Image (cartoon, rainbow, N blue to C red):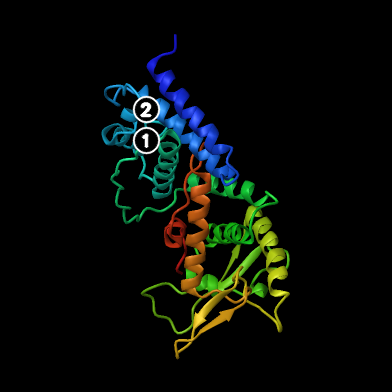
Amino acid sequence: MPSAVDRLVARLDAAAEHISTRPATSAARSRQVRWVVGELRRALEHEDFGDLPPDIRSLFSAPALQGYLTLAREGALRVAPYRRTTPSPASERVRLDCLALLAAELGVALPDLARPVPPDLKDTVPERQQQRVWAHLDAVSRDPRTTPGRVRLLAMVGLVLDTGARAGELCAMRVDDLAPDLSSVRFHRRPQALRVNEPALDQVALTPGTRVALRRWLEERDLIVGRLEGTMTALWVSVRGNHVETSTGRSVPRPAGMPLQSRGLRRAYERAVDELNVDFAGTPDWQPLPSRLEQLRRGIPVSTE
């Protein structure tokens, strides 16, 4: 005879299946809904969950769902061994979005759930996590459906992990700053709070993975800037058209292929990372990328001599 947990999970599984078969449901969202259902099963079986809800409506009550979210934030529902870490805002958003889809499919109301205030993260990225992040990004880049923005992100992350370059230093890079075989990059370091007449020119060797990522990005970049008139030397360029406001308040279109400035580069990084973290939420062993470029950079030891 099925247990109470089995009966609840059977309803959740059926709802997840219906959601997944909708034409508008992406493969990533389908995987995430099933991930949330798996977490709900483990929550129902967890000793700290509390009283078992007698039915679906009770499961989708505020106390029951807050109990699930608390266990999830603490990492208690992971399949693999875990260590307690700062909750990921991207994972939290995915959970809440999937709960809303499941509630609508099951015909129950979703209560107002407290959304945690995203912490002001200052942590750097440990070396082991850097390698894990690189492995996942490398796999993503090999997917033929990978967008130019993600190809650029992969190359940018690899370069930052190898060099510890700041956003302004990245923006100043030109294609000819790369060695012909992509074995190294040269650039001027501009450390904060350090006044020098001439920034030091540094040449840094690049790892094999970063070279592969840069080669892919340069191919994408050539396709983008090839549609422009004149010569474009900036290494990091926009992958889509946008608009810029003039001093008179008029909006002027800018085509793809324009050099990224510091603010635009940070926004491009944050947008691509946010999309990637949402898409990969629920993937085994995925460690979300830092939401800010500075957090990624601060984990890299840099000589100031």
> Which label is found at residue 108?
1
The residue tagged with tag 2: helix, strand or loop? helix
Q: State the residue in front, 219 or 224.
A: 224
Question: In this rendering, does residue 189 appear at all?
Answer: no
Task: Identify the residue at image location x=56%, y=38%.
Answer: 20
| Residue 8 % position (x, y) | 41, 23
Q: At label 2, which amino acid type do we have?
A: Ile
Crowding near the residue tagged with mark 1, few <14, some 14–19, many ≥20 C-alpha atoms within 10 Å: some
The residue tagged with tag 1: helix, strand or loop? loop
Earlier-in-chain disc, 1 versus 2? 2
Compared with residue 202, is residue 142 higher up or lower down, i.e. above or below?
Answer: above
Question: In this rendering, does residue 133 appear at all?
Answer: yes
Q: Mark 1 vs mark 2: give the one in front.
A: 1
Compared with residue 280, is residue 262 higher up or lower down, i.e. above or below?
Answer: below
Q: Does residue 76 appear left or right of residue 62 in this picture?
A: right
**How many labels, in total?**
2
| Residue 237 % position (x, y) | 60, 72
Residues at marks 1 and 2 touching, judged by CB atoms closer than 8 Å: yes
Q: CA distance from mark 1 to mark 2?
A: 8 Å
Mark 2 lies on residue: 56
- Name the outermost residue toward the front: 107
Q: Does residue 40 appear left or right of residue 130 in this picture?
A: left
| Residue 125 % position (x, y) | 44, 51
Q: At label 1, which amino acid type do we have?
A: Val
